[in-house]
Amino acid sequence: MRKVNEIIIHCTATRADWWESKSSQAKVNEVRRWHKDKTWSDIGYHYLIDRDGTVVDGRPVERTGAHVNGHNTGTIGVSLFGGLGSNENDKFSDHYTPEQGTALRDLLNTLKRRYPSITKVSGHNEYAAKACPGFNVREWLFDKKPRSIMKSTTLQATVGTAVAGATGAGTAIASLDDTAQLIVIAAACVAGLMLLYIARERIRKWAKGER
Ligand SMILES: [Zn+2]
C-alpha cells in the first residue's frame, strides 16, 4: 500500500453550471483530457466530487498523483467541481453545494479509515499562492455541522423566556420546537429534584430534632 499521510483539497475552477447536463464521469473524462494535454500520464486528482455529491475516481489512489508541486508524494488529491472566481478565504458554501460538503466529509472519513497514517487535510492554497480550492480548508474542517445546543439563539431566547415568566411558561413551552421543549422539561425536572433534595435535608434535620 502506498504511504499516505495527507489529503489535499482542490477545485476544478469551473463555473457552477459547467457541463451541468453531462454525467459526472463525462466531466471527469474532460478534466482527464486537460491534464493529458499537459503531457501528464493521467488525470492529476485521485477523486473528484460533482455538484450533486457524486464521487468519481480519478487517478488510482495507489499511484502518486499530480496536483501540488512538490507535495504529490504521500498525498491524495481530491477535487471539487466548481470554484471558478473563488478566493482562498471564501466560505465553502459560497462556491459549493451542501451535497459536495457531505460527500467530501464522507470521503475524508473513508480515506482516513483506509489509510490510518493520514494526519493532515489541507488545501492547495496552503502550498501555493492560489485561491484553490477557494475556501479555508482548516476553518471548514472544524466548522462542525451540528451546532452546539447552547449556541442556538432560538434556544437561548427560549430558556430566557421560560426562566423569566413562570406565569406565561405554559404558553411559552407550547410554542417551542421539540428540542427546546425537551430542554425546558429537563430543566424543570432538575429544579424538581433540587427541591426534593432540599426537602430531604429538612426531613433529616427534623428527624434529628434540629427543627
Ligand atoms: Zn489545486
Image: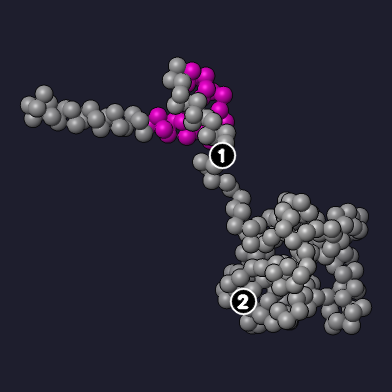
200 relative position to 89: left or right? left
- Which residue is more in the foreground, 46 or 14? 14
- Disc 1 is placed on an element classified as loop
Q: Which residues are magenta?
A: 168-189
The quarter of the image holding the N terminus is: bottom right
Three-letter residue code for mark 1: Ser
Number of other residues with Cα within 10 Å of mark 1, as a class: few under 14, some 14 to 19, many 20 or more: few
Residue pushed farthest top?
A: 167
| Residue 152, numbered circle | 1
- Which residue is more in the foreground, 75 or 122? 122
Decide: is 165 above or below 21: above
| Residue pictured at 18% horizontal, 28% vertical | 202
Number of other residues with Cα within 10 Å of mark 2, as a class: few under 14, some 14 to 19, many 20 or more: some
Residue 75 magenta-drawn? no
| Residue pictured at 78% horizontal, 64% vertical | 131
72 relative position to 120: left or right? right
Residue 10 x %, y %: 76, 67
Instruction: Return the residue at label 2.
Output: 5
| Residue pictured at 71% horizontal, 79% vertical | 71
Tell me the quarter of the picture where residue 59 sits. bottom right
Q: Is residue 197 visible?
A: yes
Residue 58 x %, y %: 79, 72
Three-letter residue code for mark 2: Asn
Residue 32 x %, y %: 87, 73
Total label count?
A: 2
